[in-house]
Image (cartoon, coloured by chain):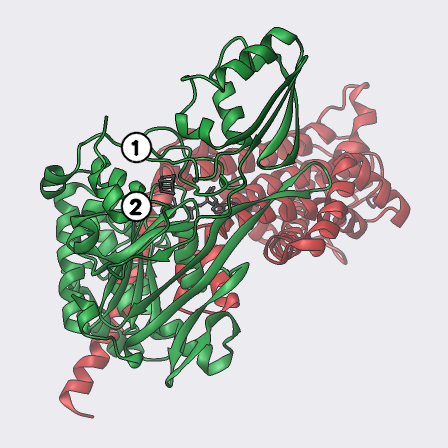
Chain colours: A green, B red
Amino acid sequence: MRAAVAPQADDLILSVREVKKHYPIREGALQRVVGHVRAVDGVSFDIRRGETVGLVGESGCGKTTLGRVIAALADPTDGGVHYSMDGEMRRIDRLEGKAAQTFRRNCQMVFQDSFASLNPRHLVIDLVGRPLKVYNEAASADLVERVVELLEQVGLGRQHLFRYPHQFSGGQRQRISIARALALNPEIIVLDEPTSALDVSVQAQILNLLNDLQKERNLAYLFVTHDLSVVRHMADRLVVMYLGKVAEAGETQAIFDSPHHPYTRELMAAKPDLEAEANVEIRGLEGTVPDPARPPQGCRFHTRCELATSACGWEVDDVIRWLEDAPGMFEHLVGVERTTEFAAELAFDNEDAAGLLSMAVRSEQVPETMRAAMRRLNLDGTKVEIEFEEVGEVELTVRDDGRMAACVLAPQEVASWKSP
Amino acid sequence: MTDVQQSRNAAGAMTADTAFRVRMRRLFGVLQGMASNPATVIGLVIIALMLIMAIFAPWLLEPNSPDPYQMPRDWGAVRKPPGTPGHPLGTTNEGGDVLYGVIWGSRTSLQLSLMVVGSTMIVGTIVGSIAGLVGGWVDEVLMRLVDVFLSIPELIFALAIAAVLGPSFGNIILALAVVLWVKYARIMRAQVLQIKQHDFVDAARVIGDSKLNIYLRDILPNAVTPVTVQATLDMGNVVLIGATLSFIGLSEAGIAEWGVLVSEGQAGIASGRWWASTFPGLMIFLWALAFNLVGDGLRDALDPRTEGR
Ligand SMILES: Nc1ncnc2c1ncn2[C@@H]1O[C@H](COP(=O)(O)OP(=O)(O)O)[C@@H](O)[C@H]1O
Ligand code: SF4
Ligand SMILES: [Mg+2]
């Protein structure tokens, strides 16, 4: 385990610290900001020389956004990405001149869509040779030889120099993208779902290529994927994201052996591979991902978590979510007046509907833990006052075994839990 | 020079050559696509004939002196019908040779459309690019301006400007240029906004290329298709609108320009002298038709959904 060999300070390439990226939501003719999509909402982790960090999570959880912030394609709303330079950690969005260039050359990116990321009007020699031209590293005949070298490293060759991207298969195009990313001899490459659009067999070839290149060049990868099985054999460490936050982080093998976060467990079950199958019942993730503009209180996963306890952040929104699927009640709901996220007065257009709700939330119809979190329930004519225990955000904490997870449950409780 | 260097230089030259040939083949593919559409071919043939006519005008008919763009006056042969010796398409009220007007008028039309389309395309492309690239209040201001221009019908707007500036051929060019640049600004802005979202622009940013290079190498080349199509269509439309302005007397009397000839000849139609306005009118029609056919063909041939995929 890596923990045994304490990482040298100079091993560190990148340090992501409390990075947030919020996108404003604008509405109306005046384009007033009415809210924010909290695409990335406070994420921290490190990347060291030669290692692969797998960034995993369902689609929409903010992986691409975070990858783009790390590659300096977008500025963070808060927090920052720090890059190790001359023994110093420096924020990449504050670098200027030569230092900015050094970072730029050392952090490259491969995009998910191989077609969209290659200018359709450029020949392979232009595409792969471009980074060399930008930094005046090669010209004319020299450039050709350098490009050929790069192409050969990714399994292509001289015969491909004068072709357009559309003349290649998806896998070959991704090889071209990788060659372009290698041109400047970077320290780290952000790989945003580099194989997600490819057939399984082609996927394996690209993964092997990436593995070989990493060994030869001591490259670090941030491997972004929604598919845990892809990074299982690639990543040294995993960062599991859910709705803009880290749910769990640690050594890949350790996480696969015993996930400390219920979400990780479910992800593993959703994409079973042979070994995972033995440990976890296959059930797959249920329910939809909540709106990242209004993330759930407490633990963001509580709306879908089968292990949720009364301390996981039950809130007014959960009642409303439940109501949405409750015929005979939702259409009678006429108003929700919140005092906080945890307390509100629900107004109905008749007393029956209000009565039905106040009965329902006391009954088996809602999860027992939700009932347990309820502090107050008051039926007053057509109005139902409801109040839950206020819970702060469930933070990522260090567990006994040194790993990180953001869950109120102890690792043993997650491990011993069996699907009913 | 060592052998290695020599062979490398040779390789470099060969490379440039190969790249050039591959690009030419692509262009050829577009032309082939256009050639497979009969309507486009008809348009191209008409345009080619018009261009030949314009270029070789001095050899086809001796230029009138002192100003070849003025209609010649043969007071001994006024209102002659087509087929008159020396005047195969007849003459006007002032004894102007209609064939002269048709042939030299092609030069006038070419001048009009090239100047108007050239200037509006450049101005519109620059304004649209700035709006799309810079965004924010710059974009707001520029696009409000464009909206104002677009809210007034082209013909009425051009007419008003030409009327204010006074009747002259140069003022018609100016009026059309003032009116038509906004279309290109609109198209270009939309293109820039769309293309700048593409991953290949981010890919260029990741390798650290400059903003100017990204604009010139990634955004502009991928944005020119609709601008080119619009320009081709406008090559025809401009002559049509220009002729309309000439027709209502906003150009100079007596010049060898199709619209002016139609205008000056129309009074005679009632008395059976159809030729003085029909032949130039036919030329306007053919010119506008040809460029519209080619513009449509170009749009199909350059369509990214069909191009090369
Ligand atoms: N440019 C943007 N403007 C507004 N919202 C965005 C933008 N980019 C991403 N988002 C939103 O941020 C969230 C995270 O998106 P993304 O980072 O693409 O997730 P992932 O890569 O994990 O699928 C999504 O809800 C997405 O809709
Ligand atoms: S804190 Fe743990 S148990 Fe509670 S909802 Fe979140 S993941 Fe489930
Ligand atoms: Mg993504």
Taking the image as drawn, is residue A16 in sight? yes
List x then y, in percent, for residue A364. 40, 17
Residue carrying label 1:
A285
Mark 2 surroundings: few (<14), some (14-19) or many (≥20) residues within 10 A:
many
Tell me the element at label 2.
loop
Question: Residue visible at 67% across and 11% down?
Answer: A349
Indicate the position of residue A353 as horizontal and vertical percent values. 59, 10
Front residue of this view, candidates B4 and B232:
B4
Q: Spatial distance from mark 2 to mark 1, Cα to Cα?
A: 13 Å
**Percent x, y of residue A375:** 55, 31
Q: Is mark 2 within 8 Å of ligand 2?
A: yes
User: Dot 2 falls on which chain?
Assistant: A
Residue type at numbered disc 2: His
**Which label sits on residue A261?**
2
Q: Count the marks: how many? A: 2
Rendered view: B112 above or below B77? below
Q: Quadrant of the N terminus of chain B?
A: bottom left
